[in-house]
Image (cartoon, helix red, strand yellow):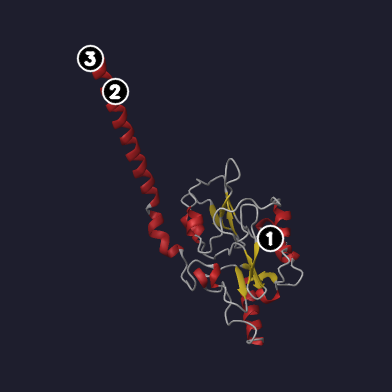
Amino acid sequence: MSIAILTDVTKCIGCAECVVACKQVHGLDKDLPRVWQKNDGLSACSWTSVIQRPGNHYIRKQCRHCLEPACAASCPVGALHTTKSGAVIYDDQKCLGCRYCMTACPYGIPRYDWDRRVPYVRKCILCFERLERGLQPACTTACPTGATIFGERAELIAEGHRRIKAEPEKYLNRVWGEHEVGGTSVLYVSDIDLDFMAYKPGLDIALPTTTKKAMESVPPAFLGMGATMLGLNWIIKRRQKLQGQSEDKED
């Protein structure tokens, strides 16, 4: 079974209870650290945020948990991977710190924990440990209006289309996440366009298929660079040795 979250933008009141619940469950710092790239509320200690748009619209932003995640496909050591539940999680014991995942993500989600001496990538993990215990993600249990709900992905997609069909004048005719980048486990229905949340709106193809060839060249590239650096090191030391011998003869 593939699980998912469906957020109905028309129901969100911007209370940020989901943000508070996420911080409490995962022991994240209450204070938002300095923002380095995007002023969207996400950081190493804020894994979900609420963005306000014109017309009193509030949109939750979090990891979309792609069915074929570009972040995992771009990681040369497998630090990011998809669990059985569908949550895309991160293993900091494997991380090289290359931050390819941050570049690869089509939604700009992963953040680097710059405020720590040993920084790691941080993002929403869909409360996968709670899922393994048969519980819902903390954010969906905390929402007071039912704007964000949890369930089986196929059922939530059907629910999204049911709402659109029932009130076509209220919603745009689209379930965000149903097809984008091969599909995601975080879905949306909305009365405003949400394409601003992606780098390349309307991209339905799964990104790992476009990056496979490039990533296959990463290991040889590392080996080639290592060999080049060793060669340069040998040449520099050789020149220093010859120069030292020449100076000794002159003395």
236 above or below 69?
above
User: Would you say 30 lies left or right of 215 here?
Assistant: right
219 above or below 229?
below
145 above or below 171?
above
Could you tell me residue 174's position as x and y percent?
57, 79
Could you tell me residue 20's position as x and y percent?
73, 59
Residues at marks 3 and 2, CA–CA distance in whole angstroms = 13 Å
Amino acid of disc 1 = Leu
- Tell which tag, 3 or 2, sits nearer the viewer: 3
> Which quarter of the image is occupied by the C terminus?
top left
Amino acid of disc 2 = Lys
Residue 136 is at least partly visible in this image: no
The residue carrying pointer 2 sits among few (fewer than 14), some (14 to 19) or many (20 or more) residues within 10 Å by Cα, namely few
The residue carrying pointer 3 sits among few (fewer than 14), some (14 to 19) or many (20 or more) residues within 10 Å by Cα, namely few
CB contact under 8 Å: marks 2 and 1: no
The residue carrying pointer 1 sits among few (fewer than 14), some (14 to 19) or many (20 or more) residues within 10 Å by Cα, namely some
Q: Which mark is residue 249?
A: 3
Q: Which mark is residue 241?
A: 2
